[in-house]
Amino acid sequence: AQKITQTQPGMFVQEKEAVTLDCTYDTSDQSYGLFWYKQPSSGEMIFLIYQGSYDEQNATEGRYSLNFQKARKSANLVISASQLGDSAMYFCAMREERDDKIIFGKGTRLHILP
Amino acid sequence: NAGVTQTPKFQVLKTGQSMTLQCAQDMNHEYMSWYRQDPGMGLRLIHYSVGAGITDQGEVPNGYNVSRSTTEDFPLRLLSAAPSQTSVYFCASSYAGDLLAGELFFGEGSRLTVL
C-alpha cells in the first residue's frame, strides 16, 4: 500500500538558516514520482519540486532541493537560506505509475523566525 | 487561463442534506481528483479519475460519490451530509500516465461546514 510519512508536525527555524523537512515513503512500485507542495496561510497549494524514482541526481529548483535516498525510501526537502516567506505548511506526495493516484503526507508546519 | 475552478467556496449544510461540489478544469487534464484537508491529517484522497468514464476510490471514499462524464468536469456529491464531513475540499488535476508531468494543479478550495 502506498504511504507517505512526515514525522515533523512543526518546526521553528531562524531566518537565513537551511531547513530540512523529512519525508519517507513506502511503495512496492518501481516507477513513481515524489513531489513537494507548499501551502501558505492563504490556503493555495504551490508545487515546489519533483523527483522521479529513476532520476540519479537529486532535483533542485532555486533554493529548494530534494535529498533523494532511494534505498532508505526518503525524499527530504531542503530549503537553503530560509526566508520569512517560507513560513507555511509543506506536504510531501507520491504518485505511483501503475495507478496514477497521488497520496499526500500529513504535512509539516514551518515557522521562520526573524 | 482559469485553471481549476471549484464552486462553491463556502457552504453550510444541515446534517442529512445533500449537495454537490463542482470542479472544472480547462487544461485538458486526464487526471482529476478530490481531497479533503483536516487539521493534523494532511490531504486525504477521496476519489480520483484518470479519464472520462473512469473513477476510482481513494483513501476516504465513504459518504461521497463522483462521476466523470466529460474531461473537464469532476463533481463531488455528498449524499447525506454528516458533521464528520466538515472540512476543506480541494479539487486537483494533472496529466495522466506521465510522472514527469504529474504536477497537480489545485482549485482554491471549498470550505464545507455541516451542522
Image (spheres, coloured by chain):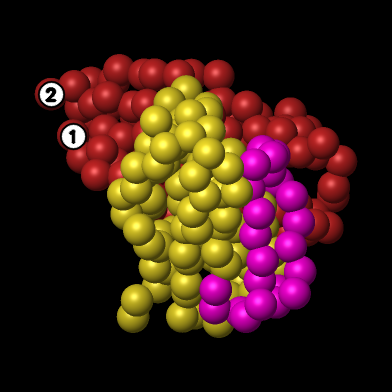
Q: Name the quadrant containing residue A14.
A: top left
Residue B86, horizontal then vertical, whole percent: 45, 34
The circle drawn on residue B54 is none
The circle drawn on residue A84 is 1
Q: Name the quadrant containing residue B111.
A: top left
| Mark 1 or mark 2, earlier in chain | 1
Does A8 appear above or below A90? Answer: above
- Residue B55 in the magenta stretch? The answer is yes
Name the one closer to the observer, B58 or A1: B58
Specify the quadrant that holds the N terminus of chain B: bottom left
The circle drawn on residue A114 is 2
Label 1: chain? A
Residue pictured at 76% horizontal, 38% vertical: A2
Specify the quadrant that holds the C terminus of chain B: top left
- The hue used for chain B is yellow
Residue B113, horizontal then vertical, whole percent: 38, 37
- The hue used for chain A is red
Dot 1 crowding, Cα within 10 Å, few <14, some 14–19, many 20+: some
- Residue B53 in the magenta stretch? The answer is yes
Give the amino acid type for the residue marked by disc 2 in the picture. Answer: Pro
Which residues are drawn in magenta? B51-73
Q: CA distance from mark 1 to mark 2?
A: 7 Å
